[in-house]
Amino acid sequence: MTSYIADFGIAKLLFGNSMDSEASTNALKGSIGYIPPEYGMGSNVSTKGDVYSYGVLLLELFTRRRPTDDMFVEEINLQKWVEMNFPDKITEVLDNNMLKDVNESEISPVMQCITEVLQIGLVCTNNSPQRRPNMTEVVEKLNKLVSTFLGSPRTFQLPIDISHMIEDTSAARGFVGESNESTSTS
């Protein structure tokens, strides 16, 4: 449960209200291991790509394996490794420290919660962007888990209201790092 600061490599700096921006990368639209498959086929950066990266981060947190771990070679990656063991052998991929302090009487609900979080990570890392949820749906699922397993109706919200941007990716152009014709990337 060590926290890290992550940069998915697609951030842009916007200068005031001008259309001038500077991309953090010109060729690679993300960090190795967090890049959705469609970016390798020339697709533009999108909010669904961000959802993919978030899913990888969830899987990484619960397995304590980075997507660039040496164990992932050829056709096996973090997502496929978790999926191959999901849900029956989930303890095979789970970080050993996750259950270290859990009482035996609490193990079943804790495992159910962990399984549901990993399922969210797997859905977010679906190879098809159309089959991935948007972040509003992910937050709703996580809120439901919190209230189900902690017994209180807590809700977490995105730091800003981006609901109007979720479906309209053109409105989120500068927000998610998409480029447009009038933007210079030097």
Image (tube, rainbow, N blue to C red):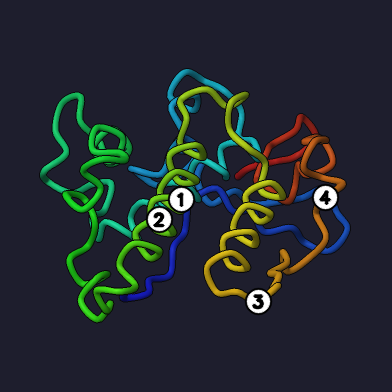
Q: Nearer the viewer, mark 4 or mark 1?
A: 1
**Which quadrant would the N terminus be assigned to in this image?**
bottom left
Q: Nearer the viewer, mark 1 or mark 3?
A: 3
86, above or below 111, in the image = above
Which secondary structure, mark 2?
helix
State the residue position of label 4: 163
Tell which residue pokes out farthest to the top in this image.
41
For badge 2, the amino acid type reads Gln
Q: Which residue corresponds to the image point at 44% horizontal and 63% vertical from the top-left?
A: 6
Which secondary structure, mark 4?
helix
Q: CA distance from mark 3 to mark 4?
A: 25 Å
Q: Which of the two discs, 3 and 4, labels the residue nearer the N terminus? A: 3
Q: Residue 152 got which mark?
A: 3
Q: Residue 112 got which mark?
A: 2
Instruction: Tell me if 42 is positioned left or right of 75 in this view.
Output: right
Which secondary structure, mark 1?
helix
Give coordinates of residue 183: x percent, y percent.
75, 39
Tag 2 near tag 4, CB within 8 Å: no
Q: Nearer the viewer, mark 2 or mark 4?
A: 2
State the residue position of label 1: 116
Q: Which residue corresponds to the image point at 84% horizontal and 63% vertical from the top-left?
A: 16
**Mark 3 Cα-neighbour bin, 10 Å: few <14, some 14–19, many ≥20:** few
For badge 4, the amino acid type reads Ser
Q: CA distance from mark 4 to mark 1?
A: 24 Å
Q: CA distance from mark 3 to mark 2?
A: 17 Å
Give coordinates of residue 15: x percent, y percent.
77, 61
Give coordinates of residue 170: x percent, y percent.
81, 35
For badge 3, the amino acid type reads Ser
Instruction: Tell me if 126 is positioned left or right of 139 in this view.
Output: left
